[in-house]
Amino acid sequence: MSMRLIFASAIAAVSFLGTVSEAEAQSRNRVSVNQSGYQNELAGRQDGRRNRMVINQRGERQYITVIQDGSRNGTTVGQRGRRNEAHVDQYGTRNDAVVGQQGSRNYASTYQQGRRNITGVSQMGRYNTATTSQYGSNNGVGVIQVGNGHDANVVQSGNGNVTLIIQGDH
């Protein structure tokens, strides 16, 4: 059994057990999952109110983890291809993360803490990596990588920061 499958099962069990007695306090969270292919894995956890998670994967051996604590946070992840991996952690209020990956062996990791932060990552090709972190309020980061072997790492702290990275093969 793969380590990721064990990890996904453990998160699902802890999430379920941790929210059973708090079902009334944790209201209006939404989850939508649509996977096709084989050996795709997903681990998700939402704690708070009105968080939403939309996941769809097409292909094989894709892996996604999402953790959201707070209220009105939103995550959308779409992956197509083979062996892509995405992780999203959000803490706070009204944060949004969108990750789209197409190709193979792309990796995206997004962490946001605060209020009204937004992250968008789009990767097409192979072996691209995007790692983003935001702390504070009203920050925005966008990463677009097209081609193979690109690497982007963004860390923003404070309020009102905006970063856009575009990398591609000619």
Image (cartoon, rainbow, N blue to C red):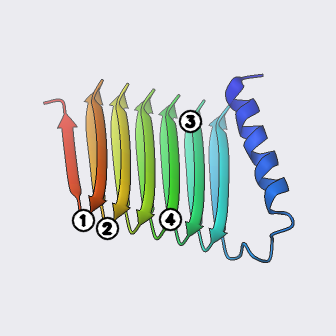
Q: Closer to the N terminus: mark 4 or mark 2? A: 4
Is 26 rendered above or below residue 153? below
Q: CA distance from mark 4 to mark 3?
A: 32 Å
Q: Which mark is residue 160?
A: 1
Q: Secondary structure at mark 3?
A: strand
Report the amino acid beneath label 3.
Gly
Instruction: Check if mark 2's residue and mark 1's residue have beta carbons within 8 Å.
Output: yes
The one nearer the camera, 170 or 8, is 8
The answer to whether residue 10 is above or below residue 23 is above
Using the numbered discs, state the Cα–Cα distance from disc 2 to disc 1 in whole angstroms.
5 Å
Counting residues from the start of the chain, the first of labels 4 and 3 encountered is 3
Q: Which residue is mark 4?
A: 92
- The residue carrying mark 3 is 59
Q: Alpha-carbon distance for marks 3 and 1?
A: 37 Å
Callout 1 amino acid? Gly
- Give the residue displayed 64% in from the left and 61% down from the top: 32
Residue hosting label 2: 138
What is the secondary structure assignment of the residue under circle 2? Answer: loop
Q: Earlier in the sequence, mark 1 or mark 4?
A: 4
How far is the residue under mark 3 from the one under mark 2?
A: 35 Å
Q: Mark 2 or mark 1, which has the lower sequence index?
A: 2
Contact, CB < 8 Å: mark 4 with mark 2?
Answer: no
